[in-house]
Image (spheres, rainbow, N blue to C red):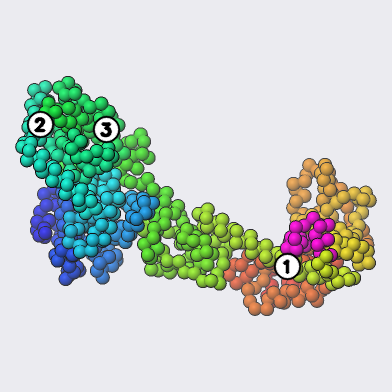
Amino acid sequence: MLRQYELVEKVKRYDPQADEAMINRAYVFSVQKHGSQKRASGDPYFSHPIEVAGILTDFYMDDKTIVTALLHDTIEDTLVTYEEIEALFGEEVGRLVDGVTKLSKIEAQSENERAAENLRKFLLAMSDDIRVLLVKLADRLHNMRTLHFIANPDKRRRIARETMEIYAPLAERIGMYDFMREMQLLAFKELEPEAYDSITRRLTQLQEGGGDKVARIASGLQLLLGSAGLKVTVSGREKHPYSIWRKMQERHISFEQLTDVMAFRVITANTDDCYRALGVIHGRYKMVPGRFKDYISTAKRNGYRSLHTTVIHGENARIEIQIRSAEMHRESEFGLAAHWAYKTGGTATPDGQAGWLRDLIEILDQSHDAEELLEHTRLAMYQDRIFAFTPKGELHQLPKGATTVDFAYAIHTSLGDQTVGAKVNGRVVPLRTVLENGDQVEILKSEGQEPQPGWLTFAITAKARAAIRRYIRHKQRDETVALGEKLYEDILERLPVEVGDKAVKAALKRLKLEDRPALMIAIATHRVTDGEVMEALIPGSTQSEGVDPHGQHKPVSIRGLTPGIAYQLGDCCHPVPGDRIVGIRQTGEPIEVHTIDCLALESGQDADWVDLAWDSKSKGGTARLQVIVKNQPGALAAVTNIFGVNKANILNLQLVNREGPFHTDIIDLEVADAQHLMRIVSALRALECVAQADRV
């Protein structure tokens, strides 16, 4: 374990401007807060964050990243809070430690390939600041180095599988190949112990049988390239066991059939020398067809650059050779960290921000394809998504801007329907709260709850919005059927005889309606009139009632129309006898009758206008009122009492808005004429519980 002064010296060696006092404080703070906690190995727990910090010094990370590494487990495993970290070490360190803590809260559901992919995306989306991901990868690498101390074999395999499926690919994604190779090797040793032992044993036998074969080939390549005037460094090694095992699996061959178990690396001074070296090697040895890759002209997605070729060496062996410049080599070994550690000589920027982060911003600004570079370097390919999880660790991917209601419906439609509240990271929040990456969301539900129309103003996922709309449609349909039933009862009372099922079936057939609910909806929405229903139930009944089959009262007579001509009363202004009226004639359409001040007349300027007036015998019509009522007990009863006293029949009553202490109702009334309607409006305005009453 690194001692305090050793860690500080390592950082100061590459960054003389590092905040030595802050690193010392973080070291002591971590030791104190972890106290007597022990790891599975029996070592003090604080040895782990110190080793993680030591790993990151090899990548020349800035002082704030080193401090984050020292503190990365304090929030999760001790009583330390985010606010305490922020107060002692600053907002930037607090944010980084909080980011690592959120990553640590997720438990990979790696039994499921899709869940593992979701977690990979989550980790990338969370790491807008790449330093968060670097600390997490260093944390996982050290845990893998000590994996063998864990007694539970199932837990060891779960951690190894997580590492192989998630963390090693992430290390590769940002170009940290040393991290990737060591993680793969340690995970392979745990997951496939027999294969690991077998391949390791064969590699040892090859080394013993071939002596210094790798060194001889490397020396020969060095001489060959040196004689061509190239200044290069050549190194060689046997491929590590996991790489060999994977090739055996892919090619379905045994270890003995595998010929390219040795790999060599040629480091040149510049890019031109890479291609010159390739030409010299291909001129001396036969190239294996299909095994040449040029990652210099076309870099990998993570920015990796190198030439790869496989040749038949003079000792009758296939050897793989990688050719790259010194700069390419540094970037391949250190990944994104190399953007500053070597280009700037390891010096920190004046504002304390890691220089490589500043470099990345400059690269983005100068790039012709900034969007693609953003994906490669800052890992923001999932910036339009957020990842939140349940208290049990189940991960859900949602669009950016999603709320707790969207989260509830993402889990299950029935949960969304019954949602009454939510807790985000342990705090009760409004349902319209927008979720952020890494939030832990607990949905509070009640069986008596139902979706609210207002949710449509903030729910953004298609699943949530469809479920809310579907419920509202069904509820409105039920309410409409219930209203139709009440109006239907009134119609039945006006019939001369009782009506049975046979008469109802016949009426449905005459009205061309499917079933009884459809009839109730038609009555409530005025698609059929009282007279039409009465006539369909008992033919001829409207004659004794004095009701026209196509209207609710005795025929309305309008002067100015040719007898028998078709007309309809405007649904926009609901004219009643006594109103000043005018008609609009459109070709092939019935004449529309409107009040003289109806706003719909503005859109009919190009139509023919007909001057109309009510006949003196005309009685009865439907008017619409908008009434704003105080939200208090007995208010609605007082309003409906006015209608009863004034002998006005309610055809429809709908609550359209509930705003704080008031609610707005739209009411359709059956009135005798305009004078009758005005008496009702005046009476409503006189009520204490009515804030406003107007004819629509």
Q: Earlier in the sequence, mark 2 or mark 1?
A: 2
Residue drawn at (25%, 67%) of the image:
77
Q: From mark 2 to mark 1, how far is it between C-alphas?
A: 93 Å
Q: Residue furthest bottom?
A: 634
Q: Who is closer to the viewer here, 310 or 141? A: 310
The residue where tag 2 is placed is: 217
Q: Is residue 137 left or right of residue 474?
A: left
* Amino acid type, callout 1: Leu
Residue 404 vs residue 644: left or right?
left
Between circles 3 and 2, the one closer to the viewer is 2
Q: CA distance from mark 3 to mark 2?
A: 24 Å
Disc 2 element: helix
Q: Position of residue 527 (x, y in %)?
A: 78, 57
Q: Residue at x 73, y 71 (%)?
A: 685
Q: Which mark is residue 295?
A: 3
Residue drawn where x is 34% and y is 55% of the image: 111
Q: Are marks 3 and 1 in contact (CB under 8 Å)?
A: no
Q: Nearer the viewer, residue 605 or 645?
A: 645
Is residue 411 at least partly visible in the picture? yes
Mark 2: amino acid: Ile
